Amino acid sequence: MKKIVLLLFLLNTAFIFAQKEVTGVVKDKTGTPLPGVNIVEKGTTNGVSTDYEGGFTIKVKEGATLIFTYVGYSSVEKSTSGGKIEVTLDESGGQILNDVVVVGSRNAKRTVVNSAVPIDVINVKDVTTQSGKLEINELLQYVAPSFNANKQSGSDGADHVDPASLRGMGPDQTLVLINGKRRHQSSLINLFGTRGRGNTGTDLNAIPAASIKRIEILRDGAAAQYGSDAIAGVINIVTNDNVNELTGSVTYGVFNTNAKGDFLPGTPNTKGFRLDQDGNGNSYGKDQDFDGGSVKIAANYGTSIGSKGGYVNVTGEFLNKNKTLRPSYDFRKGFGDAEIQGVNLFANIAIPISDKTEFYAFGGSNFRNTDAYAFTRNDGERVVEEIYPGGYTPRITSKINDNSIAAGIRTETSGGWKLDFSNTLGQNKFQYDIKGTLNASLEENSPTEFDAGGHSLLQNTTNFDVSKNYADVMSGFNIAFGTEFRVEQFKIFAGEEGSYTTYDTNGQPITDPTTQSAPIDPISGEPRPGSSQGFPGYSPANEVNESRTNFSLYTDAELDVTEGFMVSGAVRFENYSDFGSTLNGKLASRVKLSDHINARGSISTGFRAPSLAQIYYNLRFTNFNASGATEVLLAPNDSPVTRAFGIEKLNEEKAVNASLGLTGTFGDFTATVDGYYIKVKDRIVLTGYFDASSLNLGVSEAQFFANGVDTSTHGLDLVFSWKKTYDFGNIGATLVGNINDMKIDEVKNGNLDADTFFGKREKAFLLASAPDSKFGLNLTYSKNKFDGGLAFTRFSKVVLVDYNDEDDVYNPRLVTDLTLGYRLNKNLKLSIGSNNLFNVYPTKQDEQGNTEAGGYWDAVQMGFSGAYYYARLGFNF
């Protein structure tokens, strides 16, 4: 052992004495300095990044060659044999797999192909200008191998905030960062048969796509590095910092209403219909060939502050998207994507204080008005004929406010220590207004619109992070440590009285059921229900104002033992004020097998704290399906009702992650293949409905949040990328794929009936969090002023269970996207294209109205709105 250590010391010493110091500057073709350019000594992991003024200093071997890469620019190689190096980078497709990343490692020299864990780096500027995707979730669905998200219908709040996931895990098992800082979650919790049932998540669509430079997706368990929620991985959004450039676009698009595929053979009219002006669903306009018309206007501009690299970069987006209306079982129901009217603002600021110190801040505000269909009411129990003859579709409209601000100071000491102190504040507020509805207990005197209350989540996070890189320890050693303090607050606020109250025959609120009773429905012979139909309002009894704190300490280190062998480790301690402490660790390594191939792997433990919404959320609602309606109480976890059923206090989810993969770079071709295993114990789920009719609660059923199941997931991620320049043009091809197999190892139902606690239907929702496989082939071509893209995405079969306890099988689907672009001049570019070019729909289900949302499809695979056609005018000044 001593001989090995001595040999390593002598080799390292020889390397140090053979080094020389090289300086230089990197600019774009306009002469503007480029900060953050990745510079790596060819054939090694030795590298640096340019400073605020594009300058750099690096120690390299005699005769070394440097490789310069930057997101969105072509790479350049330069010899170090001369004096000071001056480099000019030209914009092109960029060298994504060689970009320095922020997430997954606190080593500023780490790139994607030499990292020990799988990381996707997505150049958002390229993707948004070469596709018709309007929102971040749509964009990531088709370019990231294991990311899944789509639109919902008839799923209450989930119609307004799309649940998204990595590797088939829950939406709340992926941590989202903005510029490396923790992003707050949405206050919404998904209750019905949607992806992420029983989970909260982060609203990625609240971040304007035009504000984003790149998105880094760490596909590996990272709770030991970043804390709670990082069981499936981490999404880090890096925002724009460019200056002296105005960029943006105006996009218009529509959906094809002609549903096809294995849709209703022989049905005389399968096109979409237009609801009447008040949206009640009682009359329809003429057939429409197109619907869901959308306009999106986006602009981004940056300007310099001072002469030392300071900047302010500002983004504004406006989105107006109409509903889509797709056929459902009796052609009278409202079913389709929600209407959205939104304004999105974001700013990113950095102001140098000295040569080594800068103040930074970033944040934004998102406001959305949304309008979505609820489940149609057309039976005797739900209809007051005087208001809605023959039935009606209530609409859940919402006002969503999402605001955030982060600020901090980062500096570097004379000894090379990098210090970063920051505070991040975020809040999400969700207000419900129910329209085209009624309170049936008020009969014909009922209003048709109610303020139903809502919920909010506030999160404040304070961080202090320290790191240092020792280039002269073996082949490089990076140490980092820090602390975090977080405060969270969850609220539910009540709506107006009519939204949650049942009234008696005299129009007075029922306070004593023994002396007061609701009017009797003449068709069903049952008392008419109270509260607003479509979504019941929150009452004062539902109101919540709860908070908690979290304190954590972490340390991680990376050691390049040699240029071909790296090891890293991390340990994190967390203490929550409501459930206690947890300690997690991670080990990872990368081995250079040859000049072109690396092997990498990791093993870690992780956790996810129960969200405040899962602990305290409560609601009394009507569960409506083809079999009729029942009144349900979703009891908070800390209530006597929950304890009476034997449901225990929520605790953290516990995870073990392992991954093993290979990366390869062969000239213009780059490949990564990574297998993974995720074991999660005590996953928090939403139970089925228990009989509560004997408890005198005024409802017939009750359900709860519980640490209910253990799961294990095996999977494989693939990313193959090739790009080549020929005389006839530039050609690129990328193949991404994910194979995912989740198993439910144990249902922890205690003494409760297993089929009721978490039965076949609930299991199917969990296992269908993502298709078993998804593969995407993206082809690009550009020549002079013209460019084009063709993408094929295949989703595997998905199986859900309907209200008749029968399997709803959604067969595999292949979706084709096409885009064509032409640069009109140096400032303007016109693009046209189609998402889902061939108008593919999910498999049609039976006509008994047993799917979760009451349409022919559940929220699976690529969604249910069909082909989308668009035109975009992009500008750059």
Image: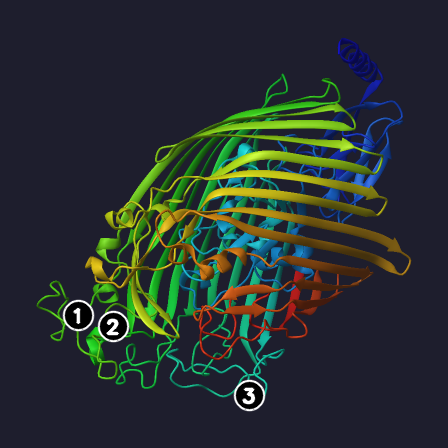
Kind of residue indicated by mark 2: Asn
Closest to the observer, 606 or 102:
606
Q: Residues within 10 Å of mark 1 (few under 14, many from 20)?
A: many
Closest to the observer, 664 or 733:
664
User: At 76% across and 25% down in the image, what residue appears?
Assistant: 58
Furthest toward the right, the residue is 727
| Rendered location of residue 474, percent (x, y) | 74, 19
User: At 21% across and 57% down in the image, what residue appears?
Assistant: 695
- The answer to whether 256 is drawn above or below residue 162 in the figure is below
Q: Residues within 10 Å of mark 3 (few under 14, many from 20)?
A: few
Choose the circle earlier in sequence order: 1 or 3: 3
Kind of residue indicated by mark 3: Thr
Instruction: Specify whether residue 370 is in view.
Output: yes
Quadrant assignment for the N terminus:
top right
Tag 2 residue: 439
Instruction: Specify whether residue 115 is in view.
Output: no
Choose the circle earlier in sequence order: 1 or 2: 2
Separation of marks 2 and 3 at Cα, in angstroms = 35 Å
Tag 3 residue: 267
Quarter-wise, where is residue 628 in the image?
bottom left
Tag 1 residue: 503
CB contact under 8 Å: marks 1 and 2: yes
